[in-house]
Image (cartoon, rainbow, N blue to C red):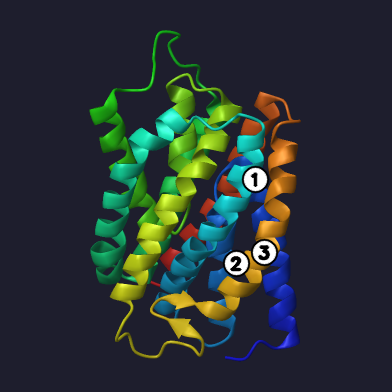
Amino acid sequence: MTLEPLLLVELVALGLATGLLAGLLGIGGGMVMVPFLTVILSSRGAAPDLAVKMAIATSMATIIFTSVSSVRAHHKRGAVRWDIVKRLAPGIVLGSLISSMGVFALLKGSYLAIFFGLFVGFSATQMFIDKKPKPSRQMPGTGGQLAAGGFIGFLSGLVGAGGGFVSVPFMTWCNVSIHNAVATSAALGFPIAVANVAGYIFSGQGVQNLPEGAFGYIWLPALVVIAICSVFMAPIGAKAAHNLPVGKLKKVFATVLYLLSAYMLWKGLTSL
């Protein structure tokens, strides 16, 4: 599978869009990347089941780069809650490895697509409703955050996202401000991505009919182009996040997730 001009244009556009969303919403861009990469791979002859799995894995690999770029911008503004990062990260790594090295390889791509759509739709609803948490509620203790991190990492490994679709609602539910939650989610994207990518490469060894340029489930041509473009755009998205009012930021987050949830549900159900 060569990087013809049309494919290059598609990947550049996708990289710019996902980089902007990575900084703006703290979601690593994966929620946008997976549906569009699925379309790109499918249109170039990849089997539906394999296209979904490679889209998820490649999306996660790009988060290694976008999270670094995005978190630097947020950190300069003092928005990252590093105390939360330290408590969630160990569980995130463990949950990610269990997901990407085991469960991911065993599940059909159509089931992964349906799960992606359902869970993203649920997350969007929680954000859109904007139910106010009890004023006294705070982040759980170390044990609770370790368990929450494991859950976030496991789900991220199944859907190829940086965890923001779970961690942002979770942190805001615990009375962490939306801007701090978005920034902290961006920082959590790095350990999520590194652990999951290791698992995708390991579990993808020996898979048949992989397209040219594949390394396990990772599609390297897409990874390189999207990573370069998204790293450029992530700081711009991070700057915009701090200039938007809280309510508007939540509505943007929810609207994007609804659209992508609908597409992946359709994709999964029609490929059963």
Q: Are marks 1 and 3 in contact (CB under 8 Å)?
A: no
Cα separation, mark 3 vs mark 2, equals: 11 Å
Q: Residues within 10 Å of mark 1 (few under 14, many from 20)?
A: many
Q: Earlier in the sequence, mark 1 or mark 3?
A: 3
Please provide percent x and percent y for residue 138. 39, 17
Q: Amino acid at mark 2?
A: Phe
| Mark 3 surroundings: few (<14), some (14-19) or many (≥20) residues within 10 A | many
Along the line of sight, which residue is nearer the eye, 91 or 207? 91
The amino acid pointed to by label 1 is Gly
Q: Determine crowd level at label 2: few under 14, some 14-19, many 20+ residues with C-alpha closer than 10 A.
A: some
Q: Secondary structure at mark 1?
A: helix
Residue at the disc numbered 2: 36
Residue 15 makes an appearance in the image? yes
State the residue at coordinates (32%, 51%).
93
Q: Which residue is mark 3?
A: 15
Q: Position of residue 240 (x, y in %)?
A: 75, 38
Quarter occupied by the N terminus: bottom right
Residue at x 54% of width, y 24% of height? 130
Q: Amino acid at mark 3?
A: Gly
Identify the element where label 3 is drawn.
helix
Foreground: disc 3 or disc 2: 3
Between the C-alphas of marks 1 and 3, the distance is 12 Å
Task: Tell us which disc is closer to us: 1 or 2.
Answer: 1
In the rendered image, the quadrant that contains the C terminus is: bottom left
Residue 23 disc label = 1
| C-beta proximity under 8 Å, tags 3 and 2 | no
Q: Give the image location of residue 179, x and y in percent.
A: 61, 29
